[in-house]
Amino acid sequence: MSKFNRKGITIITVIASLGGLLFGYDTAVISGAVGALDNYFIGALERDQELAVAAIFQFKLIITLCIGAIVLLFSSFLLKFFDKKKALSIIGLFIVVAGLVYYYQFLSLPGVLTENLKNSILGFMVSSALVGCIIGASLGDKVANSVGRRNGLSISASLFVLSALGSAYPDSMNIFFGDSLSAFIVYRIIGGVGVGLASMLAPLYIAEMAPPKVRGKLVSFYQLAIVSGMMVVYFVNYFIVQGQTEAWISTTGWRYMFLSEGIPASIFFVALLLVPKTPRFQVLKGNETNALEVLTDINGKQKAFEVLEEIKTSFGKKKAHWLFYGGAVITIGLLLSLFQQFVGINVVLYYAPEIFKGMGMETDASLLQTIIVGIINMIFTVVAISTVDKFGRKKLLIIGSIIMALSMIGLGFSLYLQATGILALVFMLTYIAAFAVSWGPVVWVLLSEIFPNSIKGVMAVAVAVQWLANLLVSWTFPMLNNNSTLIEVFNNGFPYWIYGFMALLSGIFVWKFVPETKGKTLEEMEDLWTLKKIIK
């Protein structure tokens, strides 16, 4: 590429990656507010029994609606994998079995604020945005193909702004039926829809704009933007609470944390007006002239015609059944998404200040340690960007899995043995570094590469599954970490052993089943899956 072309694609990548920055910002802003939310919302329920009974009823209603929405979305995915009769049979059986368990284990419980219920409400407050992420990611393919990748990102930016305002002032902006706790959860879900859209559309936008030789590096910038957003909000949270009393943080400070997200969200919305629609979307809508103009700016005139023909050939093929290439590519994509979350990364990112407080640190010190986590995350993401196209995706994932497994198991034992000083911190930072150089950016690169154009919609399923796994891990962590029985037996070490075991499994999975995509065009990956299907 010429200097001009490199500059153009870099600007485009940076603007699209702001969606990742907001993803990271929205993910990490909650980390500094967990203790304050516990004091402000859960504390109020403990002091007022009437309020608690009403809140528990609303909580059950919200959970039911969220589960219903998730089941509906994943049911629509099943209908695309299987014939209608078989899909409906699977869905019906799941609804009956899961519905009975859900009713007797949750809905039928009395409106009493038990320890487990308090932890469950707190966990869902922290992770509620992930419900929106699942919805947003599930709708990502429809949005991408109807209004386009760029315009879809504009919608996500608008949702970020609304969520920032509503989450900061759920009492005065409560336009819903219910109390401020319920309004807070709903606004977090709205922001999550924006994150879910951005999580699919931003990497897709970059992958479709970038030349193959630098695609891995440029898509990795999305992960760099995510960790940059996290690091920015760690500093923001720290400066908001620095020198303030716990009482001020619990009543006012947490509001400023959420409100601050409106600034980068507004910048993102305006910046998107400056970037073009992707060539693949232009071809999809029959605007080949506009597509050629964009391709010429990025690839040069001679290469532009060649790439345009490849795109036309790819889209000239009819949309295939999602199992057209067999189950291997689907399974690999879904398991990559599951393992990225089951290794426990978002437990560390969401609950880092609370984890450090559990090690005996004050609020200021715990948030300062969280900044160190953010810096390590960012440094090693930069390392990943410089190595993903050199060493390949597969090697980085396997190395990362091994180091993460050792780190999480070590952290679990340090907590179990109550050696929570510098050793525990080293284990946590090593884990963050390993994830940042491997499973953080590389999974996004792989998800944007492995699915052929004719079944590209499956990426929405993979991303939705990723958010569902994130929700399960983040929601259950307080129930595992704050359970008095588990604390008495394992001294808070138990959850980390689970994440370490998952990291070990993730490495074995990559070693055995994941293909290397380094240096291959999107069309060459389609040929790879076609060949595997023929050989099989």
Image (cartoon, rainbow, N blue to C red):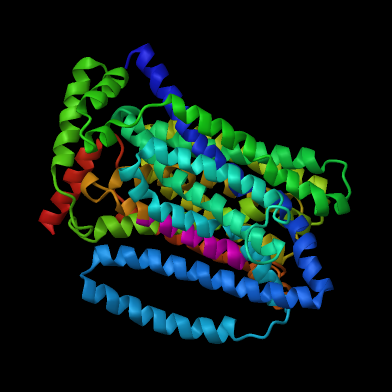
- The residue most toward the top is 3
Q: How many labels does the image show?
A: 0
The residue at 67%/57% (across/down) is 174
Give the quadrant of the N terminus: top left
Residue 468, can we see it?
yes
Residue 115 spot, x, y in % from top left? 73, 76
**Which residues lie in the magenta part?**
461-477
The residue at 87%/54% (across/down) is 247
Along the horizontal axis of the image, is 303 left or right of 486? left
Look at the magenta stretch and give its main secondary structure.
Answer: helix
The residue at 55%/38% (across/down) is 21
Residue 509, can we see it?
no
Reply above or below: 66 against 349.
below
Give the quadrant of the C terminus: bottom left
Residue 86 spot, x, y in % from top left? 23, 75
Along the horizontal axis of the image, is 283 left or right of 269? left
Along the horizontal axis of the image, is 291 left or right of 177? left
